[in-house]
Image (spheres, rainbow, N blue to C red):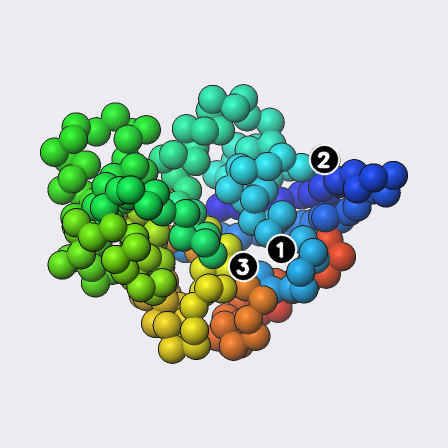
Amino acid sequence: MYQLKDVSKQYRRGKETVDALDGVDLVIGDGDRLVIQGPTGGGKSTLLQMLGGLDRPTSGSVELDGVDLAKLPEARLTKVRAESIGFVFQSFNLIPTLSAQENVETALVPLGLKAADRREKAADALKSVGLGERLRHLPSEMSGGQQQRVAIARALVKAPKVLLADEPTGNLDESMRDEIVDLLEGLWKEHGLTFVMVTHDSAIARRASRLATIRKGRIKVTERT
């Protein structure tokens, strides 16, 4: 479970101080699915970075299962990210010279698995997202939707507890957007993940049973039945 208490994040922009997050309180239970929506610059990506341990708050606490990520030494924080949190980004972030299978394997390297085990797990992960016949294809040989499926497989191959997605459909057309969102929602249910997705897309936000809207660093959570 995530528990954020009075989380603030400030940046300096020239002589100006920008409040990216302003006293955020938020609870995300195990297995929850939360969609975060807001305007550009409203703080939604900053909030996701806090949840993923990619950045630290200026003040406040970001607890995951009772451990404050904000206070962990960098080595332990890196271990938490490697073992427990999967990330999916808008830009896919695939290595262009590696095959789909090799890209997925990169997530397993920090875990110290043997090469044969990495290959097997990567192949199984790609099959689970419908790319079992694309194991040896390079990113340049795949469509945008297929590349995002590779990125999703890479995020899930290590069997994380948490999946964080930052604008995962931002580079896709509407039909592919719906396919990817359906895939993510299906994997969330299948694996019992805690799933948090940032989006600016109102069509995606309307699908959410739990929606957090964030503007000027302040958050409001709406529960839908």
Instruction: Tell me the crowding category of disc 3: few under 14, some 14 to 19, or many 20 or more residues within 10 angstroms, Cα based.
Output: many
Looking at the image, which residue sits at the far right?
Answer: 15
**Horizontal and vertical percent position of residue 3:** 58, 45
Comes first in the chain, label 2 or label 1: 1
Label 1 or label 3, whichever comes before in sequence order: 1
Residue 13 against residue 88 in the figure, above or below:
above
Q: Out of 199 and 219, give the one closest to the viewer.
A: 199
Q: Position of residue 163 (x, y in %)?
A: 41, 50
SS at mark 1? helix
**Amino acid of disc 2:** Thr
Which quadrant of the view contains residue 160? top left
Q: Which mark is residue 88?
A: none
Determine the CA span between mark 2 and mark 1: 16 Å
Q: Residue at x 75, y 40 (%)?
A: 11
Query: Pointers 1 and 3 in contact (CB under 8 A)?
Result: yes
Horizontal and vertical percent for residue 28?
Answer: 53, 52
Residue position marked by numbered label 3 in the rendering:
198
Mark 2 burial class by Cα count in 10 Å: few <14, some 14-19, many 20+: some
Disc 1 residue type (three-letter): Lys
Inter-mark Cα distance, 2 to 3 = 21 Å
Which numbered disc flags the more N-terminal residue, 2 or 3?
Answer: 2
SS class, disc 2: loop
Residue 74 lies, in percent from the top left, at 52, 24
Q: Residue at x 31, y 64 (%)?
A: 143
Residue in the picture at 54% in, 22% down: 73
Q: Dot 2 corresponds to which residue? A: 58
